[in-house]
């Protein structure tokens, strides 16, 4: 009988939610932490020679402006960039992990990464996140155990594709160093010292399921041409000629849908992008600051910080200093006050 000898790890633990609900019942008036509202406007446009991405620069913490000049356009590859909306920490760490993986991918294959590869990795990370994919010397549950499947009661290693007593395919191959490179979906097999490995897909493959609050717009140019993808926190994605995400996406999409044209020039696309981000800034309290942009073509990428400042700070005028006698006195009336002493009390100061 197969069973999980190791507890599956990874993903989020929601035990604290049950704890908070119990504390609210026991302690009336207890204020438990709630989710914070995030605000951002990001957009992207495919033009004739490449892709242009844009974002605002305001980072908010509920109703407080935490950062007025936050950088929301993240580097993935020399010709691939990504705009992040939602939770700033989630977007930053997700794009940083994608950049590291794409660098390793380029070193392994000797080729520039494709935009579709980045998009697939991001959406698998946000929803599926295979814990044991391409992991040498690690089990499918994420534990650093050497995977050597042996027949029950014997000491011979199993051949690739062999089945155990229950007829379940192991589906792995050894690496020559005692480790294993997991291929496909692991189902079960005997490990060292009778260890039974069972991949719990509810925990390992479907890891986050949208609880990482990162809405991303991936844009870049590869051998197939310019491409633009919108990736949502739950892992769904769409390839579009223009896209907008964030709390100000409604205002930005209104401008993009009205004025977008195929095969636009760089100047026209840049002007349209600035107007779309500006509409999001003016129509959404969670968006603000400046307009940043990134132009990506076949020759490379150029990051444009503070391309536009639609909301310029108001400069207060200096204080007014009027000389005595500047204001004319039209009339003057003096009313005397009559006071009567009712009681007089003297209290000595206390001295030690």
Image: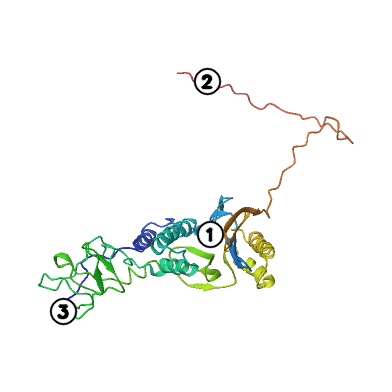
The quarter holding residue 274 reads: bottom right
Q: Residues within 10 Å of mark 1 (few under 14, many from 20)?
A: some
Residue extending farthest to the front is 110
- Determine whether the residue tagged by mark 3 lies in a helix, strand or loop: loop
The quarter holding residue 220 reads: bottom right
- Determine whether the residue tagged by mark 1 lies in a helix, strand or loop: loop
Q: Which quarter of the rendered picture does the C terminus lie within?
A: top left
Going from N to C along the chain, the mark reached first, 3 or 2, is 3
Q: Nearer the viewer, residue 168 or 42?
A: 168
Q: Mark 3, mark 2: which one is toward the viewer? A: 3
Going from N to C along the chain, the mark reached first, 3 or 1, is 1
Q: Residues within 10 Å of mark 3 (few under 14, many from 20)?
A: few
Residue extending farthest to the top is 352
Residue 38 numbered tag: 1
Residue found 71% across the figure and 44% down from its top: 315
Q: Nearer the viewer, residue 347 or 343?
A: 347
Q: Position of residue 122 (x, y in %)?
A: 45, 66
Left or right of 219? Residue 137 is left
Q: Mark 2, mark 1: which one is toward the viewer? A: 1
Q: Which quarter of the rendered picture does the N terminus lie within?
A: bottom left
Measured Cα–Cα span from mark 3 to mark 1: 53 Å
Residue 349 numbered tag: 2
The quarter holding residue 212 reads: bottom left
Q: Residues within 10 Å of mark 2 (few under 14, many from 20)?
A: few
Residue found 18% across the figure and 80% down from its top: 166
- Determine whether the residue tagged by mark 2 lies in a helix, strand or loop: loop
Measured Cα–Cα span from mark 2 to mark 1: 59 Å
Left or right of 348? Residue 197 is left
Going from N to C along the chain, the mark reached first, 2 or 1, is 1
Q: Position of residue 135 (x, y in %)?
A: 31, 64
Q: Label 3 belongs to which residue? A: 165
């Amino acid at each position: 009988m197969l069973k999980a000898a190791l507890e599956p790890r990874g993903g989020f633990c929601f035990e604290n939610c049950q704890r908070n609900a119990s504390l609210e019942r026991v302690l009336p008036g207890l204020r438990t932490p709630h989710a914070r509202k995030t605000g951002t406007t990001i957009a992207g446009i495919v033009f004739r020679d490449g892709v242009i991405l844009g974002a605002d620069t305001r980072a908010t913490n509920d109703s407080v402006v935490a950062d007025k000049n936050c950088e929301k356009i993240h580097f993935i590859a020399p010709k691939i960039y990504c705009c992040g909306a939602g939770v700033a920490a989630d977007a930053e760490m997700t794009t940083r992990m994608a950049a590291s993986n794409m660098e390793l991918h380029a070193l392994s294959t000797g080729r520039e990464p494709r935009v579709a590869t980045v998009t697939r990795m991001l959406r698998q990370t946000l929803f599926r996140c295979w814990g044991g994919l391409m992991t040498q010397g690690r089990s499918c549950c994420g534990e650093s155990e050497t995977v050597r499947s042996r027949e029950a009661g014997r000491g011979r290693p199993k051949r690739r594709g062999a089945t155990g007593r229950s007829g379940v395919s192991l589906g792995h191959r050894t690496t020559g160093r005692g480790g294993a490179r997991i291929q496909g979906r692991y189902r079960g097999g005997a490990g060292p010292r009778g260890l039974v490995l069972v991949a719990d897909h509810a925990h390992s493959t479907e890891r986050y399921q949208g609880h990482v609050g990162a809405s991303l717009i991936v844009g870049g140019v590869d051998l197939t041409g310019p491409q633009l993808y919108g990736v949502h926190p739950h892992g769904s994605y769409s390839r579009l000629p223009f896209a907008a995400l964030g709390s100000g996406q409604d205002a930005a999409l209104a401008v993009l849908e009205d004025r977008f044209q195929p095969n636009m020039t760089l100047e026209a696309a840049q002007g349209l992008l600035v107007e779309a981000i500006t509409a999001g800034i003016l129509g959404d309290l969670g968006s603000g600051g400046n307009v940043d942009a990134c132009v990506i073509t076949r020759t490379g990428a150029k990051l444009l910080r503070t391309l536009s400042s639609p909301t310029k700070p108001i400069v207060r005028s200096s204080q007014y200093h009027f000389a005595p006698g500047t204001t004319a006195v039209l009339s003057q009336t003096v009313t005397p006050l009559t006071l009567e002493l009712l009681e007089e009390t003297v209290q000595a100061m206390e001295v030690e």
